[in-house]
Image (tube, grey):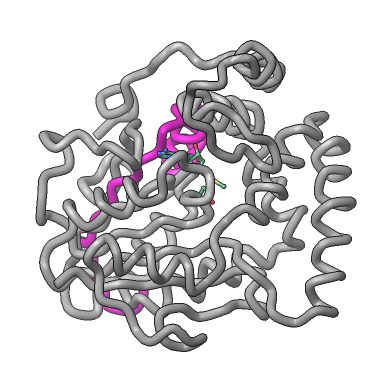
Amino acid sequence: MSLSASVHLRRCFARNKTFVRCINSSSSDTHRKTTSFGFQTVPEDAKESMVKSVFDSVASKYDLMNDAMSMGVHRLWKDQFVGDLKPGRRGPMRCIDVAGGTGDIALRILDFAREKYADRETSVEVVDINDQMLKEGFRRFKQTMYHNTPQISFHEANAQSLPAEQFPDNSYDLYTIAFGIRNVTSIPAVLEEAYRVLKPGATFACLEFSRVDNPLLGTLYDQYSFHIIPLLGTILTGDRASYQYLVESIRKFPSQPDFARMIRDAGFVTGKDIDGGAWTNLWGGVACVHTGVKV
Ligand SMILES: C[S@@+](CC[C@H](N)C(=O)[O-])C[C@H]1O[C@@H](n2cnc3c(N)ncnc32)[C@H](O)[C@@H]1O
């Protein structure tokens, strides 16, 4: 499926200056529900376009910045995330990678299934709210053997309300979301949709930044996050604000047990509330994998 067929191109929201205007214009409105946008409190109905502005702004440099900010470590986490899910082990799977951005997880799923199980039928539908991120992903997949095959497609949609005609109930074997769920306005709405689209017995898997349990590691991580990452953002992309938001949004994300509870509240079954049970910490909780199974 071509990008132009599957992505409904919408007018891009203005660049990162827009969200400053959003906050100012709505600060006098005390009746609107609010949510966090990094460390700021903003009207719930403004967050989505503000997040979209961030990713519009970073899309063209997203992969470069990911490598620079994490010194390549995000690749190891993503490899482990996908490797542990073993896509293709029990035969071809229909996968949906939500907030899939430039397709990092999708590519790993397809490579893993092919390399380990000679599976060329597993497919991934990459879903993202941001057409700029999807375009980068599409461009990247053009260099791969999956381009122009039924194994990959890109779709612009909101994780909180996947259109049912395009993403029907009980239709996927695996739902992945990596470094995406902390950006959404309503985590419960995303989890509810994940539950709806998965087949009974299928797996929800989330890779996200999380809470570090070791105080020393926590202090080092804070120093790095709040000083080095925005600086790298400024140097490599000229955009400090977006990277400041990305760092702040990590700190606002629920702790491992709180997020595990939300996954169960959506109907999934998880392991026990311990590392190695409902979740698996990576690098002491800098990142974390949560899984749940639809019953
Ligand atoms: C940090 S990127 C992660 C991209 C990719 N999953 C990865 O691991 O490299 C977060 C992505 O979430 C997307 N996103 C944010 N809110 C979303 C929503 N409500 N629905 C779908 N995608 C969303 C952004 O557009 C962005 O592409």
**Image position of 215 with respect to 33: above or below:** below
Which quadrant is home to the C terminus? bottom left
Please tell me whether residue 129 belongs to the stretch shown in magenta.
yes
Quadrant of residue 87 in the image?
A: bottom left
Total tally of numbered discs in the picture: 0
Tell which of 247 and 178 is nearer to you. Answer: 247
Quadrant of residue 245 in the image?
A: top right
Residue at image x 41%, y 50%? Answer: 187
Query: Residue 134: image x %, image y %?
Result: 44, 34
**Image position of 113 with respect to 227: above or below:** below
Say whether residue 288 is left or right of residue 203: right
Query: Residue 120: image x %, image y %?
Result: 23, 63
**Residue that protrudes farthest toward the front in the picture:** 30
Please tell me whether residue 145 belongs to the stretch shown in magenta.
no
Quadrant of residue 147 in the image?
A: top left
Tell which of 214 and 91 is nearer to you. Answer: 214
Say whether residue 222 is left or right of residue 7: right
Which quadrant is home to the N terminus? top left
**Image position of 221 with respect to 146: above or below:** below
Query: Residue 90: image x %, image y %?
Result: 18, 79
Query: Residue 36: image x %, image y %?
Result: 59, 40
Tell which of 90 and 46 is nearer to you. Answer: 46
Residue at image x 43%, y 47%? Answer: 100
Residue at image x 80%, y 79%? Answer: 215
Magenta range is: 115-142
